[in-house]
């Protein structure tokens, strides 16, 4: 699937964002190696700290349906500018797609892609638990 199609799916997912506190809507579309796409949006909470990011919503949806291998994830935000994944989401992406790609979108500058390992160099791996 090309990046444009994945970005469109992320934009659709963004419309479901629950962001009454920040008013910053985020959408994500995660492409699995089997070709399936899992979307996610941010889901905020009155406690703030219980907020779930769009990327983690997408990964959690996929894993809870038995899918664990991914190629890339597209992320869009209501600001219309690039929305870089937060540190926790980088670690989550590193767990399931250490060789994957993150595609960001800006309404004015277009798409920009990063490898997960560029976004999280020397990330903590399961193999490090000894
Ligand atoms: N947010 C995401 O959904 N993904 C990120 O990687 C960055 C932040 C959300 C969390 C919160 O609902 C809002 O953006 C403002 O931080």
Image: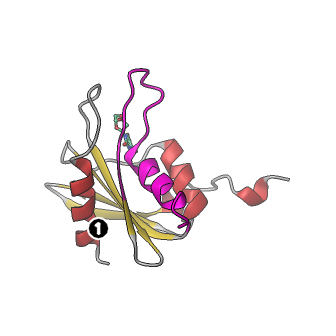
> Ligand 1 near label 1 (Cβ, under 8 Å)?
no
- Give the residues in magenta: 39-68
Nearer-the-camera pick, 97 or 20: 20
Q: Splitting the image into four quadrants, where does ligand 1 fall? A: top left
Q: Residue at x 48, y 56 (%)?
A: 59
Is 119 in the magenta? no
Secondary structure category for the residue under label 1:
helix
Q: Residue at x 28, y 33 (%)?
A: 19
Question: What is the residue that sits farthest to the right in this orientation?
Answer: 130
Q: Residue at x 46, y 49 (%)?
A: 56
Position of residue 20 in the picture relative to residue 90 (left or right) = left
Residue under label 1: 6
Give how far across and how far down residue 117 sits, in percent: 54, 62
Question: What is the residue that sits farthest to the top in this orientation?
Answer: 47
Q: Residue at x 32, y 78 (%)?
A: 1
Is 43 in the magenta? yes
Display colour scheme: secondary structure
Mark 1 Cα shell of 10 Å, populated few (<14), some (14-19), many (≥20): many
Give how far across and how far down residue 82 sits, in percent: 27, 50
Give how far across and how far down residue 30 sits, in percent: 40, 63
Q: Is residue 3 above or below residue 49?
A: below
Question: What is the residue that sits farthest to the left in this orientation?
Answer: 108
Q: How many labels were placed on the picture?
A: 1
Residue 128: name its quadrant: bottom right
Q: Is residue 55 above or below residue 37?
A: above
């Amino acid at each position: 699937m090309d990046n444009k199609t994945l970005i469109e799916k992320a934009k659709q997912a963004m419309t479901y964002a629950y962001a009454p506190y920040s008013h910053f809507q985020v959408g994500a579309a995660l492409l699995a190696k089997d070709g399936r796409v899992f979307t996610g949006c941010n889901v905020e909470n009155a406690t703030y700290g219980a907020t779930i990011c769009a990327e983690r919503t997408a990964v959690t949806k996929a894993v809870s349906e038995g899918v664990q291998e991914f190629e890339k994830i597209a992320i869009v935000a209501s600001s219309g500018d690039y929305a870089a994944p937060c540190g926790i989401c980088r670690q989550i992406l590193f767990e399931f797609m250490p060789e994957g790609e993150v595609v960001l979108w800006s309404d004015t500058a277009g798409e920009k892609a990063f490898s997960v390992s560029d976004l999280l160099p020397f990330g903590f791996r399961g193999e490090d638990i000894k």
